[in-house]
Structures are given as structure tokens and as C-alpha cells.
Image: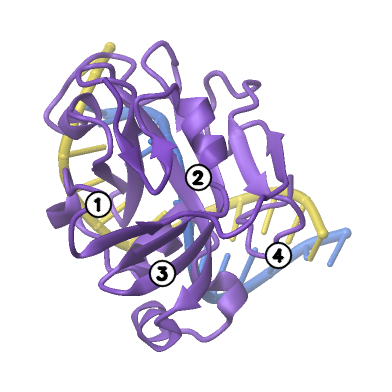
Chain colours: A purple, B yellow, C blue
DNA sequence: CTTAGGATCGCCT
DNA sequence: GGCGATCCTAAGC
């Protein structure tokens, strides 16, 4: 069983998908840009929301691949994952940063600022700029208002340990577009 | 440049 | 009751 969207097989392991997503453009209602930073989370991963099994919150992580898992971070921010592996596995890729390319005006308005560099450079910022909320939980990546566009050229990818977690902090499952200035933090 | 604290809420122990 | 897959602002060096 495979699930291809924008040339990526979302039934592959999370770290592979996280790497392949670098350079891919994600748009919601035509607003968004190029993914420049991701992190992989898998079932056998103490840092993952899916580690302790299915709950009401993480249900879509255990749903079919190629959809979105949206969660509330610190009771304030909305963050977006792309679900991967097979149905029931509980793996996903956190979209940590985007290079804004489309709908700059809308994103600036939603973020209340105009510095392109800070518009989508962090998972909570991405959520705010793309107007993501709980309503997008379970939304398919290949259905409106979402759009995924393949990277238009080969990209160089850098890796490092994931950010903001205390468990399994040494696993190098953070991926970034080499030399991007839109990372949430340097590699 | 680094560090600290507050905002704010659903989940888990 | 505690603690996050965070962000912003302010203060210290």
C-alpha cells in the first residue's frame, strides 16, 4: 500500500518523509510557501505524541497517511504534522518552518508583523500564518483547500537533533534546507 | 547574544 | 496537579 502525494510516498518511515518534504511547497487556500524545516516522530519514539498509543488528541496520527494531524501546543499555538506510515501506525512529520512565497499579505496580517524571515519560522508561527486550527485535523493533503507541490529542483538537506523536546533528544530527526535563512533555529 | 517569565489548556499521572 | 513537538517580550551581560 502506497500513498503518493506531490511525488512523495507517505507510507514510508517518518524520517524518510521528513527529508523528502524539504523543498516541497505547501499552500492552504493558496497561502504558504516552501518547507525548509521538518522533524520526524514515530510510534517507538518517547518524544512522539503517539508513543503512549491512540488518544482523542492524537487520533489522526493513527489514521490514514497523507493527512494532517493538528495539535494545540502550550494551550496557545496550533501546529501541523503530515501523517505517514500505514493506517494505525502513529507516525508523523512536524512542519517546523516555511519560506513564505505565496500570500505574503495574508500571512503578515495574520501574524501582525511584516518580517518575512519571522513569518513562518517555527511550528506555531506556521500555524498562525496559514490560519490553521483544529478544524484542519484529519484534512487530506491532496484535497482543497490544501495543496502540495513537488520541489522544483534537487535540494541539499542538513540534519540535526530535534528541538524543544526532553526525551530522545539525541535522535537526528530534524531536517532542513541547506543554508536557508528561514529556519526556526540554526542547525 | 543569552536567559527568564508569562500566556493558557488538554492530556496524563 | 504538572507539564509540554512554543512564542513573545524584557532584562541582563
* SS state under label 3: strand
Mark toward the start of the polypeptide (1 vs 2): 2
User: Is A145 positioned to the left or the right of A80 in the image?
Assistant: left
Identify the image quadrant of the C terminus of chain A.
Answer: top right
Identify the image quadrant of the N terminus of chain A.
Answer: top left
Q: Percent from the top left, x then y, of residue B2?
A: 77, 51
Q: Percent from the top left, x then y, of residue A39?
A: 52, 37
* SS state under label 1: loop
Q: From mark 3 to mark 1, how far is it between C-alphas?
A: 15 Å
Q: Which residue is mark 2?
A: A21
Within-10-Å neighbours for mark 4: few <14, some 14–19, many 20+: some
Q: Which residue is mark 3?
A: A32
Q: Does residue A164 show up?
A: no
Q: Residue at x 45, y 83 (%)?
A: A104
Give the foreground label among 3 and 1. 1
Do the residues bearing badges 3 and 1 touch, measured as CB atoms within 8 Å?
A: no
Give the foreground label among 1 and 2. 1
* SS state under label 4: loop
Q: From mark 3 to mark 4, how far is it between C-alphas?
A: 16 Å
Q: Which residue is mark 1?
A: A142
Are labels 4 and 2 on one chain? yes
Are labels 1 and 4 on one chain? yes
Do the residues bearing badges 1 and 4 touch, measured as CB atoms within 8 Å?
A: no
Chain on which label 1 sits: A
State the image quarter where residue A179 is shown: bottom right
Within-10-Å neighbours for mark 2: few <14, some 14–19, many 20+: many
Mark toward the start of the polypeptide (4 vs 2): 2
Chain on which label 4 sits: A
Q: Percent from the top left, x then y, of residue A75?
A: 28, 50
Amino acid at each position: 500500500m502506497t500513498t503518493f502525494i506531490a511525488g512523495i510516498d507517505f507510507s514510508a518511515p517518518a524520517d524518510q518523509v521528513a527529508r523528502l518534504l524539504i523543498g516541497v511547497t505547501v499552500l492552504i487556500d493558496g497561502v504558504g510557501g516552501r518547507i525548509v524545516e521538518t522533524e520526524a516522530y514515530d510510534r517507538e519514539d518517547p518524544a512522539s505524541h503517539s508513543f503512549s498509543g491512540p488518544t482523542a488528541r492524537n487520533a489522526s496520527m493513527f489514521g490514514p497517511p497523507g493527512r494532517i494531524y493538528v495539535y494545540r501546543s502550550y494551550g496557545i499555538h496550533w501546529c501541523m504534522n503530515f501523517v505517514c506510515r500505514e493506517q494505525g501506525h502513529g507516525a508523523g512529520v512536524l512542519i517546523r518552518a516555511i519560506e513564505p512565497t505565496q500570500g505574503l499579505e495574508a500571512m503578515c496580517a495574520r501574524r501582525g508583523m511584516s518580517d518575512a524571515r519571522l513569518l513562518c519560522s517555527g511550528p506555531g508561527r506556521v500555524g498562525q500564518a496559514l490560519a490553521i486550527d483544529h478544524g484542519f485535523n484529519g484534512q487530506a493533503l491532496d484535497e482543497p483547500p490544501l495543496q502540495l507541490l513537488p520541489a522544483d529542483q534537487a535540494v541539499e538537506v542538513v540534519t540535526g537533533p530535534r528541538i524543544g523536546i526532553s526525551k530522545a533528544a539525541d535522535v537526528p530527526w530534524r531536517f532542513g534546507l541547506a543554508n536557508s535563512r528561514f529556519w526556526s533555529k540554526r542547525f
